[in-house]
Amino acid sequence: MTTSPVSNAPALESPHVDHLWKDDDANRLDPVQRLVYRSNLLGTDQRITNTGGGNTSSKIMETDPVTGESVEVLWVKGSGGDLRTSKKANFSSLYMDKLNALKPIYDRAEPKGVKTEIEDRMVSFYPHCTFNLNPRASSIDTPLHSFIPAKHVDHMHPNAVIAVAAARRSKELTQEIYGGELEWVPWQRPGFDLGLVMERIARGDETLKGIVMGQHGVINWHDDDRECYDLTLELIDRAARFIEERDKGEQTFGGAKHASLTEDHRNAVLVRLMPWLRGQLGGIKRQFATVHADEALLRFVNSSDAPRLAELGTSCPDHFLRTKIKPLYVGWDPASGDVDALQAMLEAGIEQYRKDYATYYETCKHPDSPAMRDPNPTVILIPGVGMIAWGKSKSESRVAAEFYACAVEVMRGAEAIDEYIALPQQEAFDIEYWALEEAKLKRQPPEKALARRIVLVIGAGNGIGAATARRLMEDGAHVVCADLDPAAAASTAAELTETYGAGIGVAGTGIAGCGPAIDAAVDATDRDSVRAAIEKTILAYGGVDDVVVTAGVYLAAGADGSFSDEAWRKTFDVNVMGAYVVADEVARVFSEQDLTGSIVLTTSVNAVVPKLGSLAYDTSKAAANHLVRELAMRYAPNVRVNAVAPATVVAGSTMFPRDRVLDSLGKYDIAHDPNDSTEALRDRLARFYADRTLLKEPITPEHQAAAVRFLVGEESARTTGQIVTVDGGLSEAFLR
């Protein structure tokens, strides 16, 4: 096992990096686990590397599973991994002797070098070098790690060092900051040739500690893993201190040109514009938004130099792969407060951006380039407001925001010490449309059926609503769990996040946001409350695609079978007016997005099967059935409106508290022990109801959720104005 010769050595203290290594923790781990440990620590700090960016490696002696001999194996972060969250399974493992045996193959090729056919073809040999049948695909950076002779290698994308790498005088600044400890190489696309270049540099001067990679980042090495980690932090800290000593303060980015809106004003602008923007950018490929407006980002967006620097685009390849060649900067004056003017500027800006992107593609494409991808911007910058980043999921949009925030810090640093320069367009294109990047995209798993859809579930705190939230998220939807009981809504959202994860790009990014499930408090009978829940949904994700209303109320008749005026009013307020208010409010969002959507209400078989003792409830549900038909006509053709009609869903339902269950058991003369648990009593009642149906099985919230899933999905794309009954087969509720 490789261990640091200095146990518990003093850690670097710096405001620019966090030293997290603990020898007591590391020394309990085997060599591969130590690599994972080192990687996770480095990935935790976004100032060191971005989500999914950078690579770490260790050359470790292993036992060959066939020969039993001791062999040297390169363990390196595999393709598509993220250092912060990586486990052993995210690392590829390759025989070092086989990797070295690839060099003669490359040397014999003519032509060879950057962007030649043989360089890309070398990647196809990596699977033949795999140790112990490891299925993890190797990164294109593998040669950078394998051919550097040191045992441990870190390749990071720290903002401070990229600022040096993206400065016009990058080579001179590298010498000024690091002396002769680091070499400098100009921009070169990662690959086999760059690995050989780095090997020559490292073997040519054994005193070197690393290399600054022009426009890209830093790679450094050591024969001890703890020392390699410490060196990575030290190199980043030295660049960051050099930049901070030259920081321009209030004159950063040429000084402020605009002032930021207040948070409330900014949110009002965003709520007004984001659904419209989502429709403009998404089409059938719907997008999710992340808003970022911290002090550092606003300082850039509000500055005099923002238009110039934004137009230059980003430098580090990882940045523009997420944010495209450049953002869309909109030269709006927030002091005017004219949101209509901002919308017009956005519309014109998006159209021009598409033209510019098409020109970029046509100018830079090769005969074998993949087809042009989505020409819409991924990042939109608005003075006074901040940044809106877009992606195919909340995670993807949050990472895009993270990457452009990193790019802003790179520009700040480069402008502080010199002049920022971006990667040439052709080089950027050759990365963006690289066949190996295209292959990486194709390796991604297919999207789930409800991916890219934002669903607001009202009544998600329990019962049918909670089951619906689970079912929709199972198929890939992002879900807003809204309920009259905020704690219940939060509980469902927390359960979903625990089950499906918060997504990538969360911890340590500084990017405000959320995962694929959030909670909201809502009273469906209160228009302001409904509007607030919808606005929260828009600010979290950018819009709404579907709304499911499962909230309802059942009030029993008095002892004499009568209902008070208050009982009638509340029943109709919740079961009818509440559904209408939700539909009326969300329809505005649907109209602004100009995308197809759906509304699913929850009615009841009681709407067509009258029952003694539930007069107010039954008539309210009959009204709700007709509301479905009216709304379907009103909102066609873009919005479908349907409903599910449950029957006696007892399990998990707030409509069947213990008192009502006991009353029902008594009313139907069902034998029971009143001292039994509520769940046992519910099971007895559910069995009674099931025996009255044709299918003889109890109806559960999950059965209703399955029907909702059908009505939300493409499977029912030609269905509107319909009531889907899920009652186990009550003949008296048959279509009439």
Image (cartoon, rainbow, N blue to C red):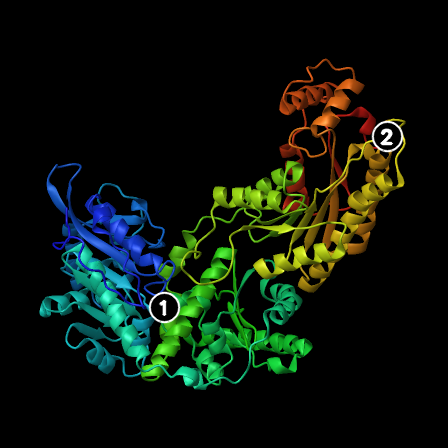
Residue 355 in the figure: left or right of residue 701: left
What residue is drawn where x is 48% and y is 48%? Answer: 446
**Residue sitting nearer the eye, 421 or 273:** 273
Would you identify the image quadrant in which residue 572 lies?
top right
Measured as percent of width and height from the top left, residue 301 is found at: 50, 77
Instruction: State the residue position of label 1.
Output: 317
**Foreground: 719 or 435?**
719
Residue 225 percent across, percent down from the top left: 18, 55
Could you say which disc has been placed on residue 558 in the image? Answer: 2
Q: Give the x, y percent position of residue 581.
A: 77, 53
The quadrant of the picture occupied by the C terminus is top right
Q: Earlier in the sequence, mark 1 or mark 2?
A: 1
Q: From the viewer's perspective, tell me whether residue 181 is left or right of residue 218.
A: left
Query: Which residue type does callout 1 highlight?
Result: Pro
Residue 160 in view: yes
How crowded is the residue under tag 2: few (<14 C-alpha within 10 Å), some, or many (20+)? few
> Which SS class for mark 2?
loop
Q: Looking at the image, is 617 positioned above or below residue 396?
A: above
Does 379 appear above or below 688?
below
Residue 728, visible in the rendered structure: no
User: Residue at point 80% right, 20% down?
Assistant: 667
Between residue 352 and residue 499, name the one nearer to us: 499
**Residue 662 in the image: x percent, y percent?**
73, 22
Tag 1–tag 2 contact (CB < 8 Å): no
| Horizontal arrangement in the rendering, residue 719 relative to residue 539 (left or right) | right
